[in-house]
Amino acid sequence: DAKTTQPNSMESNEEEPVHLPCNHSTISGTDYIHWYRQLPSQGPEYVIHGLTSNVNNRMASLAIAEDRKSSTLILHRATLRDAAVYYCIPPQTQGGSEKLVFGKGTKLTVNP
Amino acid sequence: NAGVTQTPKFRVLKTGQSMTLLCAQDMNHEYMYWYRQDPGMGLRLIHYSVGEGTTAKGEVPDGYNVSRLKKQNFLLGLESAAPSQTSVYFCASSRIPPGRGSTGELFFGEGSRLTVL
């Protein structure tokens, strides 16, 4: 199963871009990379997912390295509401079933 | 559209008491999950269900039981609560399994904060 490495915390200023890195060097060729975030006192919410090419949606962009061993979640203009814990999650197989296993993620602080 | 609803949102129990957390989803999803989250930790999977009438163990199933009698509901039970079960519990559902080769998106509830004294 793929293992991920994310920084424990990052800081950004409001309205500046934020690049959240994730290393997943053991990911297999067909595994999608999922990103979720958890706002304070809320359940996690889906942000974006991708396989090989860069992906964009209304929340963020996902840049996936050509060798797929790392990816970067990009928030183009951070707002205070983006302060959250961001999880980079490749799928894992446990007990014969496939599921998403959440690590500790990166806690993003956005300064006004 | 309510999505995933968890009840109760807060509960305080004494050691040895029992209780049930209810998760309800209105998206007709097949897959449902119960996670727990402890301070400074990520989410750990307790039990999950791949459809009505089915349940399976996750990473930390001991001390919990689950049932999925109706497709829209997934119940998490604590038969004899222990202080180690003090945690925030999250329920999630998905249309397809969010696993390998899958784009299945998880939808989470707002959480149920349980304190066991």
Image (cartoon, helix red, strand yellow):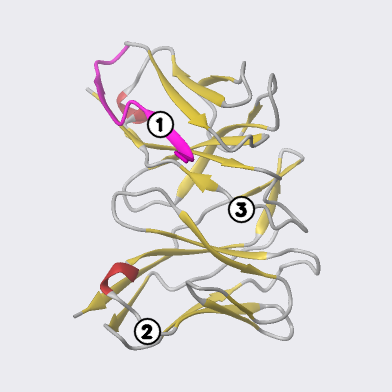
Seen as rendered, the residue at the extreme right is: A29
Q: Is residue A76 above or below residue A43?
A: below
Residue toward you, A106 or B5? B5
Point 46% across, 18% down: residue: B77
Left-right relation of B70 to B88:
right
Q: What stretch is highlighted in magenta?
A: B1-16
- Spatial separation of the CA atoms under disc 2 and disc 3: 24 Å
Report if the CB atoms under discs 3 and 1 are less than 8 Å apart. no
Q: Does the magenta stretch include residue B37?
A: no
Q: Does the magenta stretch include residue B11?
A: yes
Give the labeled residue for mark 1.
B6
Residue toward you, A89 or B15? A89
Type of amino acid at the residue the image marks with label 1: Gln
Give the labeled residue for mark 2.
A77
Point 78% across, 59% down: residue: B101
Looking at the rendered structure, the secondary structure element under dot 2 is loop
Number of disc labels:
3
- Looking at marks 3 and 1 on the same chain, the residue that comes earlier in the sequence is marked by 1
Tell me residue B61's x, y (percent): 54, 28
Type of amino acid at the residue the image marks with label 3: Glu
Report if the CB atoms under discs 1 and 2 are less than 8 Å apart. no
Residue toward you, A60 or A105? A60
- Spatial separation of the CA atoms under disc 3 and disc 1: 18 Å
Give the labeled residue for mark 3.
B105
Q: Is residue B72 visible?
A: yes
Point 44% across, 58% down: residue: A104
